Amino acid sequence: MSTIRRYHAAAWDEAIVFELGAPGRRGVVPPASWAPPSTEPSFAPGLRRESPPALPELAEYEVRRHYTHLAQQTLGMMGVSLFGTCTMKHNPTVNEQVGARHEIAEVHPRQDPSTYQGVLGIVHSFEAELCNLSGMSAFSFQPGGGADAAYLHAVITRAYHASRGELAQRTQVVTTAQAHPCNPAAAVSAGFEVITLPIEEGGYPSVAALKAVIGPKTAALMLNNPDDMGIYNPHITEFIDAVHDVGGLAFYDNANFNGVMTRLRARELGFDACMFMLHKTFGAPKGGNGPSVGAYGCSEELARFLPGPRVVKNGEAYELVEPDGSVGRVREFLGNVPQVIKAYSWTRAMGTEGLRTAADISVLANNYMEKRLMAIRGVSMSLPGKALPRLEMTRYSLEEYRVETGLTGGDVQNRMTDFGIDAFWMSHEPWIVPEPFTPEAGEMWSKEDLDEWIDVLEHVLEEGRRDPELVRTSPHNQAVAQIDGSGLNDPETWAVTWAAYRRKHAQV
Ligand SMILES: Cc1ncc(COP(=O)(O)O)c(C=O)c1O
């Protein structure tokens, strides 16, 4: 039976919250206790602000109406969202509630650490959990995302070789064509030259190709495995050994950890450092360098280079210390601590067995999808005809379909949103597989959800054969039709906060 549903988003033409309301409007949220506080909170001189913040003033119903409207206009996570190479997960409410507890949300990083020992205890315990999952000796939660963690590794690589008097000689970082572009970008930002290994006949770069490019100039290897096509390179330990033999470091971009959780540990494979995405694999909310955390883990030898402060346990107390050889900060304080707490809550709820089951389900679900998608006319797979198992995701191509109809993956993606399906992820490396798309089933979605997603794709492809214009001009059922994306790469135009918008558009 078809699972295609009729769907239409609401369109409210909603003003932003700063433009709503009027002075004096109020709503009431009862405090936990109606009793007045016994003492006025004391602030250090200079901390109390002199004028009230420029916040909008709204009645309760206006606030509720505003956010309901926004929710009705938003597709994200309302439909089925299979956003590959990012392991897009539902963010459980329980973790949001834990992260919003006042003991966490109201802590100021400049408070004396003795006043938020519980928070530090959680950060410390979660570090131990990630050490357990990776085999690494220490973690920093400071990087504000995966790319930031890759950058931290590049900077630590520099510090490590400098400490051995070899920085001038170690100028090259080796990566692969299927590594996320943040790896070469981080290496270049830290001053290295990048060597990219191509994907070969076998489906991944060969050890021979690696050995041909490494030597006394090699500073580090930076890659992911499984790669961004879901393919696991089984020769990974030979890669790492070869890089170690020439004196380089090996960094594991573990962003694609979902399908291998508890099945492998970065340190046991030989890696010197790795990173996990708390905002992907560990169920915390995602957002580019916003609320995200790229947890960076490393060996005991590299731990002295980590950014400070680090949480250490001294007797019963937790303290903040600066490592001796620290490379400095990549972000403020301990990073996005509420995210760490949500990820900790998620991991504790899952337990080791839960993580293993989730990893296995994500691989099973992907393989189920793969079987169904490969039966659809116009869909093909990267590296076709190779008996290469895919783990938690598979990269597909709509190239045959484009040749047949003139429609692109972007057109198909837009039209799928007309059926309440979140836009799929195409590819971080769009130059390798033509018209790519990379859905990731994950462990969370039900079989009915996956079937619905696949049915909608099949339906849209057929629609495009009958009426290409319908698909090319989509979406038609969304709050906003096709948008002009030309300003998205222009820092003079876009703004992520209201204050920045007003500044950039000269309203202040
Ligand atoms: C394999 C891989 N590495 C690194 C990143 C970068 O992570 P972030 O978006 O958190 O900077 C991504 C993001 O999609 C990724 O898929």
Image: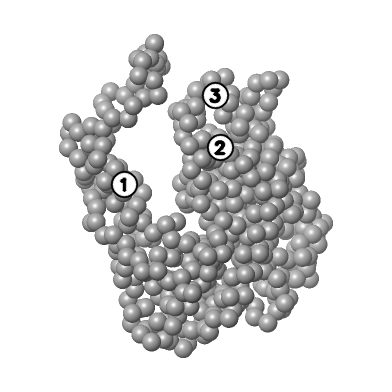
| Amino acid at the residue labelled 2 | Ile
User: Which residue is found at the position 44% from the left and 63% from the top?
Assistant: 422
Q: Is residue 92 above or below residue 260?
A: above
Q: In this view of the protein, which residue sits in the foreground, 71 or 230?
A: 71
User: Which residue is found at the position 48% from the left and 43% from the top?
Assistant: 93
Nearer the observer: mark 2 or 3; the answer is: 2
User: Residue 87, position in %: x, y?
Assistant: 56, 57
Q: Sequence order check: which comes first, mark 2 or mark 1?
A: 1
For marks 2 and 3, give the CA distance. 13 Å
User: Residue 283, position in %: x, y?
Assistant: 55, 48
For marks 1 and 3, give the CA distance. 32 Å
Mark carried by residue 341: 2
Q: Which residue is mark 3?
A: 116
Q: Secondary structure at mark 2?
A: helix
Query: Is ligand 1 closer than 8 angstroms to the Cβ of mark 2?
Result: no
The residue sitting at the front extreme is 1
User: Which residue is found at the position 40% from the left and 75% from the top?
Assistant: 411
Q: Secondary structure at mark 1?
A: helix
Q: In this view of the protein, which residue sits in the foreground, 210 or 122?
A: 122
Query: Is ligand 1 closer than 8 angstroms to the Cβ of mark 3?
Result: no
| Amino acid at the residue labelled 3 | Tyr
User: Residue 280, position in %: x, y?
Assistant: 56, 52
Proximity of marks 2 and 3: CB atoms separated by less than 8 Å: no
Q: Sequence order check: which comes first, mark 2 or mark 3?
A: 3
